Amino acid sequence: MTFMTSILVYVMIWVVVLFMVLPWGVHIAENPEPGHATSAPEHPYIGLKLFITSVISLFIWVIAYIILSY
């Protein structure tokens, strides 16, 4: 696997994992402020979710790298 292919595979895995991680721990506000969407999450914790996504993606990428390299 070349360097560019490795990066591309990691990015594709990262995006898929991000969409799986985004709904984790979402709680909708019971009384949203005026002007806010009623479906907006109260505390999205986006930084934590990006970190978790990166760690899970790295783990999956290592497995994919081993499988595709040998």
Image (cartoon, rainbow, N blue to C red):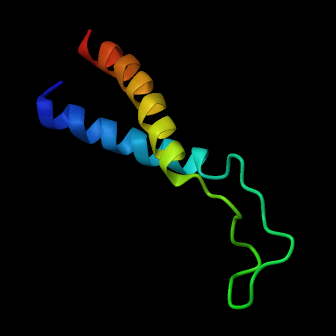
50 or 45: nearer the viewer: 45
26 on left or right of 47: right
Q: Is the residue 31 above or below the residue 29 in the image?
A: below
63 on left or right of 19: left
Q: Is the residue 30 above or below the residue 22 in the image?
A: below
67 on left or right of 21: left
Callout count: 0
67 on left or right of 43: left
Q: Would you identify the image quadrant in which residue 31 lies?
A: bottom right
Q: Is the residue 9 above or below the residue 28 in the image?
A: above
| Residue at 75% over, 83% down | 33
Q: Would you identify the image quadrant in which residue 37 lies?
A: bottom right
| Residue at 32% over, 43% down | 11
Q: Would you identify the image quadrant in which residue 54 lies?
A: top left
Picture coordinates of residue 55 (x, y %)? 44, 29
| Residue at 71% over, 64% down | 42
Farthest residue to the right: give it. Answer: 30
Location of the C terminus by quadrant is: top left
| Residue at 22% over, 37% down | 7
Farthest residue to the top: give it. Answer: 70
Picture coordinates of residue 45 (x, y %)? 58, 52
Picture coordinates of residue 46 (x, y %)? 52, 53
Location of the N terminus by quadrant is: top left
